[in-house]
Amino acid sequence: MKKAILSLVLIVTTFTMQAQETVVDTTKFWKSSGNMSLLLNQSAYNKQWLGGGISNLAGNFGLNYDLNYKKGDVVWDNKFILAYGLSKIKGNATTAKTDDRLELNSLWGKKAKAKNWYYSMYFNFKSQMDLGLDMNGVKISHFFSPAFFQFGPGFLWKKNDNASINIAPAAGKLIMVHKHFTDLGSSFGVLQGDNTRFEFGASISAYYKFNAIANVSIENRLNLYSNYLEDPQNVDIDYQMNVVMKINKYLSANIALQTIYDDNAIKGVQVREIFGLGVNYGF
């Protein structure tokens, strides 16, 4: 009996040691990096200032986090973006929102035979966190309304972590808004009385980041989408550029530019630009 027990213990111990030897440290396949920034803008005038102007204070917080996986012929890139900003003008009882973004991009790829090419699957989510008002103070949006989803299979060309293009010829797009925004008419492309809109088309997403000069990095992101089901010639465009000019380890000047064209939402080009000096922390 003792010999049987001893034999069993030896077998279990040997198996455990072999299992421990074959355990792979999966953390070495993941690479993460991120950046947090707090931009501050302030203008002040005294009563004797004849040039005109109103004192104001504005602040913008931004978080940009990358979590990428690579093992063998498989890559999986994930990017999370969060941005929020407020502005307070002297004499106004309320503050105004200057930025509000919540975005997640996920791109999975498996190596193809051609150099730098992968079979891919992508997912994109965009929304906001706070209430949105138009120029007349009317509520036009809030958290998760609108919310945009894109997803589909495709082909990825990836040279490195700073240069890639994903082509998805069969991509779905879902737009969600709360029904109270469509009671009287359409909103963000969702028809009156509905709270969702589904599109099926093609998507092209490109990413390119480079250093223009020492301590100046420029990040570019472009997304194009054509809806096969309605006016495919009217291509939706979303271009974002982020410029970071480092002064030292913690201080930087930042420029954020975004242009959007979506004829279902509005017949025109939407432009957002933010510039400021602030605290910058990389991790």
Image (spheres, rainbow, N blue to C red):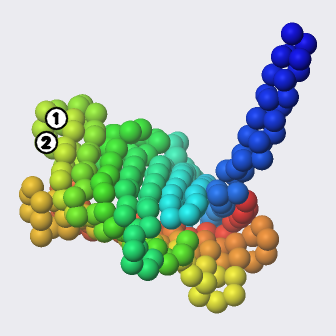
Q: Position of residue 233 (x, y in %)?
A: 12, 70
For the image, the number of numbered tags is 2
User: Alpha-carbon neighbours of circle 2 within 10 Å: few (<14), some, or many (≥20)?
Assistant: some
- Please tell me whether mark 1 sits on a helix, a strand or a loop: loop
To which quarter of the image does residue 117 belong?
A: bottom left
Residues at circles 1 and 2 in contact by the CB criterion of under 8 Å: yes
Q: CA distance from mark 1 to mark 2?
A: 6 Å
Which residue occupies 45% across, 77% down? 116
Report the front residue among 239 and 226: 226
Query: To which residue does mark 2 refer?
Result: 191
Residue at the extreme left of the image, as rendered:
230
User: Which amino acid type corresponds to the residue marked 1 in the rendered image?
Assistant: Asp
Task: Report the quarter where the N terminus lies.
Answer: top right
Q: Position of residue 59 (x, y in %)?
A: 61, 56
- Please tell me whether mark 2 sits on a helix, a strand or a loop: loop
Q: Position of residue 248 (x, y in %)?
A: 79, 75
Which residue occupies 79% across, 71% down? 249
Say above or below: 165 vs 188: below
Q: Is residue 143 left or right of residue 32?
A: left
Say above or below: 128 vs 59: above
Which residue occupies 18% across, 53% down? 200
User: Alpha-carbon neighbours of circle 1 within 10 Å: few (<14), some, or many (≥20)?
Assistant: some
Say above or below: 139 vs 159: above
Query: To which residue does mark 1 refer?
Result: 194
Q: Is residue 30 left or right of residue 84?
A: right
Residue at the extreme bottom of the image, as rendered:
213
Report the front residue among 216 and 84: 216
User: Which amino acid type corresponds to the residue marked 2 in the rendered image?
Assistant: Leu
Task: Report the quarter where the C terminus lies.
Answer: bottom right
Report the front residue among 81 and 24: 24
